[in-house]
Amino acid sequence: MHLERVDVWREEQHGAGPAGEMRMGDVLELLPSLVEEYAGKVQLIYLDPPFGTGHSFSMRVRVGEKEWKTGSGSLVMQSYEDDLNVEAYLALMRETITACKKLLSDTGVIYLHVDYRMHARLRILMDEIFGENNFLNEIIWSYQTGGRARKFFSRKHDVILFYRKTKKYYFNLEAVPVSRVDVRRNHMKRHVDADGRVYRSIRSGGKVYTYYDDEPTFPGDVWDDVSHLQQKDPQRTGYETQKPVKLLERIILSSSAPGDLVFDLFVGSGTTLEAASYSNRRFVGVDLNPFALQVTRRRLTGRTAAYIAPPCEGNPEIEASVEPGIAYYDVRLEAYQPEPGVSARSFTGLDAVDSWSVGYLRNGVFVAMAHDVRLRHSPALKRVLQLPVLEGQPCIRVGDVLGRYFYYVFTPEGV
């Protein structure tokens, strides 16, 4: 069999969970088509845009089996430039937030994650677009990570602005209980009742209030029980600005129901899409960076998802073979080598491969049937994947450590 390079814009992966999709591209360019398709259908939007830092952000990419075993990445790649001036930044956010209002259903809500740099400006913008009467909360996400200031009080929190679209909005606080044991006691007295249950009591206004430790309580607008990710946290994907799954789970579980549609227009490390999929919500994500697509694909391995992205430029060398069988083809990845000069680092052989899939090309769509990706608990790639014998043109996708992905169809020799 002969390998022939093809351009593919859409890949579909079938697995657990409801359908979702990730689109790669500039958010302002994609918004018109998203509004046309999803206007009034979205229950929850979470936005974690650039914070207006003026900095260039990068991510560490693990190369090959050895680095996936150790957990340290030697390849540093740019993830995004947060360098817009204030006017351009606010223009971006105005257009994005205006589209978000159109996307939301009447029961829908939006969470906008910011920090001290743009908080005041974006609060005014949100009031203008959604209306002051639709403001619900200014959530403080407090954490202890990061450096310590000496000339001012250390900045140890982000702000999440929470707005509804209409008074019909959906919100279920009981879906996000927290253990009362983890809540500060405010000097309440500890007691044990006749059944051995621990409870606390406090006198206020002439009345005694009691709270049992085994009964849940619910979060307020200061979230200090969700930790920022440590450098060696197993959740880490390499993205500097990655948010913890627990943070997004609280937002998704409280503000949507199973089967609802969740949007994230600045996907980054893919936390929102992972939390949505595993919470049985549908999702749509957008990001401009190919590494956002790569990281999200890894986090959604085994889940139902579609990936929509333009073909990548490049001309790597690839070798693969197919052994026909009765029910399955054995597809073997033989070799892969990026073309000279594409990176400052030298890659050897299959160490350059981050993931690969086999499936069928059907009407221009790659339908993945088997997939393998490097993970911490399985750092070595499988050299052979089994492809069920079905209708369609056998196809292989190879993703490399540079965030690129290439598709090839198998054709008879000489065709």
Image (spheres, rainbow, N blue to C red):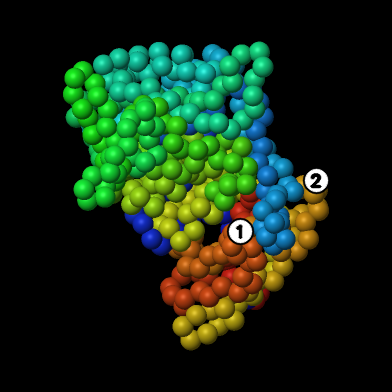
User: What amino acid is found at the position of numbered circle 2 in the picture?
Assistant: Ala
Residue sitting nearer the eye, 179 or 349: 179
Q: Position of residue 261 (x, y in %)?
A: 32, 43
Identify which amino acid the numbered label 1 is placed on: Arg
Q: How many marks?
A: 2
Q: Nearer the viewer, residue 289 or 186?
A: 186
* Nearer to the camera, 186 or 302: 186
Q: Is residue 299 above or below residue 148?
A: below
- On-image quarter of the N terminus: bottom right
The residue lying toward the viewer, choosing from 21 and 364, is 21
Dot 1 or dot 2, earlier in sequence: 2
Q: Secondary structure at mark 2?
A: loop
Q: Which mark is residue 299?
A: none
Percent coordinates x, y for residue 338 in the rendering = 74, 56
Q: Quadrant of the C terminus?
A: bottom right
In the displayed structure, does residue 142 sit left or right of residue 106?
A: right
Q: Is residue 256 visible?
A: no
Read off the residue under disc 2: 344
Could you tell me which residue is drawn at 48 percent across and 86 percent down? 326
- Identify the residue at horizontal 41%, vertical 62% (top origin): 15
Spatial separation of the CA atoms under disc 1 and disc 2: 25 Å
Q: Nearer the viewer, mark 1 or mark 2?
A: 1
Q: Which residue is mark 1?
A: 376
Measuring from the top left, give residue 19's x and y in whole percent.
36, 53
Q: Residues within 10 Å of mark 1 (few under 14, many from 20)?
A: some
Q: Please, is residue 44 above or below residue 375 in the view?
A: above
Q: Residue at x 43, y 25 (%)?
A: 140
